Image (tube, grey):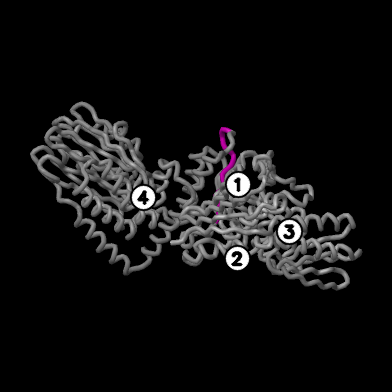
Amino acid sequence: MQTSITSNGKDTLVKFEGSLDVSCQESLKNELAKQVQPEDQRLVVDLSLVTFIDSACLGVFVSTLKNLKAKNRQLVFVAPQEEVRSIFQITRLDRLFMIVDSLKDLPPA
Amino acid sequence: MKNHCKASIKNLSEISGAFDKHFSSLLSNLPDNALSSQLINDLKISFTEGLANAAKHALELEKKGEIEFDIKLKSKFVQIEISDHGTGFDLKKIDTPSFKEMNESGRGIFIMRQLMDEVVYIKGLSKNKLVLKRYLPFFSRKDEGLDLLHELSHTVVSPGEESEKNIYSLVLKKLVEAFEVGRASVMLYDHSKKRLTIKAAVGLAKQVHEDVSLRPGEGIAGFVFQHAKSCVVSNIDKNKDGWEKKTGYKSLSLMCAPFFDPESPTKPLGVINVTERKNKKSFGKKDLRLLTTIANQLTAYLYVSRLKETLERADTMKREFQIAREIQQSLLPKTPMQLKELEIHAWLENAASVGGDLYDIIYKDKQHLYVVVADVSGHNVAAAMNLVNCRGHLRALLEVEREPARVLSKLNKLIYEDLSKSHQFISIILMRFNLKNLTVKVASAGHDAPWIFERKKAYSLDTKIPSGTLMGLELDTTYQSALIRLKRGNLLLLYTDGLPECRNSKGDIFSRKKFYSYLQTLRPQKAYDLIDSMQTLIAQFKKQAPFRDDVTAVSIHCL
């Protein structure tokens, strides 16, 4: 798993790359925990380069969403690949998560 | 050829990469795209969840060594076994996760259950084993409902009904009858819209028909399409899998199965949906298996239909057809055949194309004579070749084997692969006459039973002759023979279904019922009388219409 983080003042954009599985669960957790800290920004997770995700990492996303919601902040997932989207769908997390097809489709912050 | 790999991991970090590393070595034995990328991903996530689960119960808690796994890639399924030495758990007690609450964990087993056909956990004394099995598409499970298949195959390959839209409608009609449902639909994937839309339906309001549009992965049909995995929901209100009840569902139970692109049988073309059973009972796994089988056959019909259309478009191919037909005709034995004990007359009418029917008479020795009638599904070059091949094998087999049932079992083994490759099957009846005592040993592979004509009555032998599986459907099927005693003066009629299913110019089918009641009235005196009656009957019914299917009748008179 590789991570890059950028911010445009409104959104914090986190882009992961590679496979998100149980072996990187801890580092994913730490990385996202850091991004929950800033108080005012929306968290945008770009999944376009993520090739695989398992339930351990889905769990991290769920707890991130929970923490952000508690602070009244939004979490948006962007451009999951077909295989990753299908895991969201199977676990019905597509009903819980906000998912958009591309960065252009992000709703106004 | 290597078709399984065994390995182990000792810590969590080895989980990622384990699947790619080991599974790719198995895949390298297969042609490219033998498995869809979605299927590989389904296997990968289930494998990863299985390993992570074992790791949770073995590595962390127990610190007890390694986790072993074994991935087997068979022709019909992939099986993954994962063993650990930890304390284990009770799989049955693990329920589906709550879809509304935001729990961090508890999705691993659910994912496996959704994506795999079998998830079994065996808790042992020193070792626990998780077995995950996923059937590969198209081959699916053991075929069921062969009667229905037989019927379907004949309806669908009847010429004049080969367009895809017609095939969908026919399959739908059959589904409604087979499952007694009020609603069934065929959805196709539209590549330009990237949506599944309804192509043909019964019991659906036109508006719904036009409005429904799903992305792959969306809802039950979307799931079935994306993962190429059929699905049954016994009660949508109480389902624990998280399926949402769509407005407009009247019924609680539903099924959905994928069907495939004949050119690349790992990729679904679309799905078949069935719901609103009239007796209100829930669908079960058995129903789903039948639906899966029908969906697989739909794939086969599309294949046959496309092949036929391609062939018919090509002018040069038409000449080839003509040649193939002539060869086929030349293989038929000369009739009438006059023996001391029997007189045999035969009639075989070829439809416009090759393929179709075959009869053969093999005079073995002074005491024994074989008569065979066969019908292959399909009217193309492949069908004709399969039939000629079948004739050759049968003649060779009769050199070493006499018992009709055993002959058919061996014959099926010999031609099974060729038939299943071309998605065809053959119905065949084989009779061995003992000329001395006028007995007949007969075995049938899904063929219409012969009729017997006595002085005062005529009846079908269908209750006496066990009808076995069509050839080309199951490799290991066996057949049973029946012994029929004939009397002098009796007549026997063997025929193919082109006779009762003959069509007139309006497309109406003559029908079995009418055919049977007509046969009951006949009192033929000689072998030729029966053939003459058949020819007159068909001529009166169909008038100037061309033959759409081959027609065969063989009449045998015991002198």
> In terms of depth relative to the viewer, which is nearer, B403 or B339?
B403
Q: Chain of mark 2?
A: B
Give the amino acid type for the residue marked by disc 4 in the picture: Gly
Q: Measured from the top left, where is residue B512 in percent x and y?
A: 34, 38
Disc 1 secondary structure class: loop
Estimate the spatial distance between the alpha carbons at disc 2 and disc 1, rounded to whole Å.
51 Å
Residue at 27% x, 42% y is B406
The image quarter in which residue B233 lies: top right
Residue at 72% x, 68% y is A1
* Quadrant in which the C terminus of chain B is drawn: top left
| Residue B195 on the magenta span | no
Q: Residues within 10 Å of mark 3 (few under 14, many from 20)?
A: many
Residue identifier under label 4 = B472
Residue B210 appearing in the image: no
Q: Is residue B165 above or below residue A49?
A: above
Q: Measured from the top left, where is residue B529 in percent x and y?
A: 17, 39
Residue identifier under label 3 = A57
Q: Residues within 10 Å of mark 2 (few under 14, many from 20)?
A: few
Q: Which residues are magenta?
A: B270-279
